[in-house]
Structures are given as C-alpha cells and as structure tokens.
Image (spheres, helix red, strand yellow):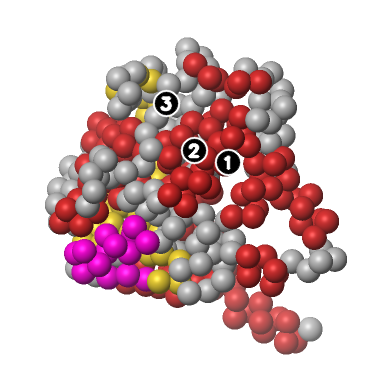
C-alpha cells in the first residue's frame, strides 16, 4: 500500500499535465470533424461533383505567419478519424509545433462520395482521379483554411500517392513531402492487384452493378486484401495454422461499415495514378519538383510496388527510408518508432 501511494504521488503531476493537455485540446476543438463546402469540384473527366464537400480535422495551432501547416490525406478506404494516431506531441506530426490537417479524400464516405451524395448517389457518382482528390485538397487549404503555403504534405499508401500528386501539381505551395508506401505511377504488378480487387467487388453477388439496397459483404475482396496487404512471411509468422479459421473470419469482415461504391470509386482513382500523365520518364517528372522529400518504401510491399518511388528518389538524390522487415505494406507495424523518429526529424529540420 505504501509503495502504491508513493507511485500515485509520483504520477500525480504527470496526470495533471496529461489532463490539462486534454482540456486544452478540447477547448481548441482539436480533432473534431469539420466540413468545407467547395461548391462545384471540376474533375479530370470533364464532369463535376456538385455539391462538393471535403471533411477534415485539425490538430495544434497555426502560427503567426501561417508557415507550420502539414496536410495529411487519408489512405484507401480510410477516414480522417483513422489518422488521429499520427498527431500529438510525441507522434509523427508534432501538434505542439505544427498545425496538422487530416483530410478525408474524396470518395471515402465522409467527404463527397457515392454513398453520401444526394444528387449523384451510388453508381451515378462520377469517376475521380488522385489528381481530383488533390485539387479539392488544394481548394480546402486555400479557400476554406485561407492558407498561402504549407510546410509539408505527408501521406501513407493512397495518401502517399496524393503526396506525389501534390508535388507534381503544386510544387511551389509547400516545402516538404513525405510519401509513405505510395507510388508516383502504378506498375503492371500494382495494376494486376487493383484490377483483381475491382473485379472481386463488381462480381460480388450483392453488388448489383452498384445499385444495391443492402450493403454487399464483399467477402472475397476482403480476403484478397488480407492476402496482399502484409507479406507472405508476415502472415505465416504471425498467424498459426490453428489460428487460421479465426483469422479468416476476421479478414472476411475486416472492411465492414465501408460502402462498396465508395471503395470502388477510390480504387478506380488509384488505377489511373500516373504523375507523368502517360509520359515515359519518372525522372523528368521528378526533376520538375523542387520540394524537399523523404521517400519511404518497404522492400516487401506486396500491395504497392516500391520500384517507382525509389526510381523517383534516385533521380533527384532524395533521401529514403527503406523498410526491410516482413510487414509488407503495413510498414508501421515493423518500423513504427524508427520511422516516426525519422519523419519527425525530417519535418522538424529547417
């Protein structure tokens, strides 16, 4: 009892600091979902999203000269609430130093998407590209948040694809980019992955061409994701034969709560990703970008092939962080602390 009392006494000041930080964050409205109305969003296809809404959450405070904003868009099938883990005093984006903006990419079910559009619902929602997502995010930054410049754009997976697109489209608008397990251009292997996932979604018995009234299970699509997101070695190491039935059951339902049309429209956006716009040279595209970059890849990534990102980095001698663990696309499982420290150092450097 005496030891417990002493321990509590030592912890009391830390608990007070933690509680004070929580109260301060609440007072700032930190992490609360906000929605910006962008009116009409023009798309690469020549079509429009109207009304066009982009959801976001902010962390920390914008400094006096507006130079400390970091934009962090969502990954495929992810939402800004999933990005909370990356913002905080000891997190990837230090919210005591930076003004973090977690953005729900178009099609994620929170920003304008097939599932929530009243005028372009379900399969009537127009096709979008990664470039369309970034164009809307630029408008969020400039029109809704009235920012004249960003310190950095950071993104993981499809968010990393958006970071490459940001570099290509708005290279003068920000200083640093950290694409994590993303790609500037899909390889044939990536396209094979994405095309099979597309076919599995569209072939689901409950999908009905996107005109379903009951959300389809997409069990085979979910199982395919469970196959490709980690590396084979990671699954074999972490899931025993005895555990496989429970692992499979969990995998079949892992994407529950996400709309099938939303998943499809973002998937189709990734399929068209190519910052060269059909050109042959990633090097030429990279040389046009004058943004300080840290390129992060995993050698065992079986979902997003690391070769194009490495080619991009080598073309301009950009620093890289290369994970050689067996976690595959789930790079933060193997490299969480080390990767977080490397990205923080990069973002914090002058």
State the image coordinates of residue 80 (x, y, percent, origin top left): 48, 44
**Callout 2: 10 Å neighbours few (<14), some, many (20+)?**
many
Helix, strand or loop for the magenta stretch, by majority: helix
Asked if the residue at tag 1 contacts the one at tag 2, i.e. Cβ–Cβ closer than 8 Å, the answer is: yes
Would residue 86 be found to the left or right of residue 134 on screen? right
- According to the picture, the residue beneath numbered tag 1 turns out to be 197
Residue mark closest to the camera, 2 vs 1: 1
State the image coordinates of residue 337 (x, y, percent, origin top left): 48, 73
Observer-nearest residue: 350 or 216?
216
Residue at image position (58%, 41%) is 197
The part of the chain drawn in magenta is 307-321
Q: CA distance from mark 3 to mark 2?
A: 10 Å
Q: Quadrant of residue 263?
A: top right
Instruction: State which tag comes first along the sequence, 2 or 1.
Output: 1
Observer-nearest residue: 131 or 4?
131
Residue at image position (34%, 59%) is 309
């Amino acid at each position: 009892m005496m030891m417990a009392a002493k321990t509590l006494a030592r912890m009391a000041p830390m608990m007070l600091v933690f509680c004070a930080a929580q109260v301060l964050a609440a007072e700032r409205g930190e992490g609360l979902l906000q929605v910006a109305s962008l009116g009409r969003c023009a798309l690469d296809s020549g079509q429009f999203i109207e009304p066009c809404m982009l959801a976001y959450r902010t962390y920390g405070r914008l400094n006096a000269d507006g130079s400390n904003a970091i934009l962090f868009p969502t990954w495929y099938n992810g939402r800004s609430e999933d990005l909370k883990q990356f913002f905080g005093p000891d997190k990837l984006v230090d919210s005591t130093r930076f003004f973090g903006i977690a953005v729900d990419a178009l099609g994620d079910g929170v920003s304008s998407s097939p599932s929530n559009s009243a005028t372009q619902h379900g399969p009537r929602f127009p096709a979008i590209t990664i470039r369309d997502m970034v164009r809307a995010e630029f408008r969020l930054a400039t029109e809704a948040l009235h920012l004249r410049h960003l310190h950095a754009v950071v993104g993981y997976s499809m968010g990393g694809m958006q970071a490459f697109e940001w570099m290509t489209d708005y290279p003068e608008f920000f200083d640093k980019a950290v694409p994590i397990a993303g790609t500037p251009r899909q390889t044939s292997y990536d396209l094979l992955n994405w095309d099979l996932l597309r076919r599995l979604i569209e072939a689901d018995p409950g999908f009905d061409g996107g005109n379903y009234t009951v959300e389809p299970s997409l069990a085979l699509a979910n199982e395919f994701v469970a196959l490709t997101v980690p590396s084979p070695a990671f699954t074999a190491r972490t899931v025993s034969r005895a555990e496989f039935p429970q692992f499979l059951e969990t995998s079949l339902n892992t994407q529950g709560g996400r709309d099938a049309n939303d998943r499809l429209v973002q998937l189709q956006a990734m399929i068209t990703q190519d910052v060269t716009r059909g050109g042959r040279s990633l090097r030429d595209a990279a040389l046009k970008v004058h943004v300080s970059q840290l390129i992060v890849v995993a050698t065992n990534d079986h979902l997003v092939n690391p070769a194009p990102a490495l080619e991009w980095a080598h073309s301009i001698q950009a620093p890289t962080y290369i994970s050689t663990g067996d976690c595959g696309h789930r790079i933060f499982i193997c490299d969480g602390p080390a990767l977080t420290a490397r990205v923080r150092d990069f973002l914090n450097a002058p």
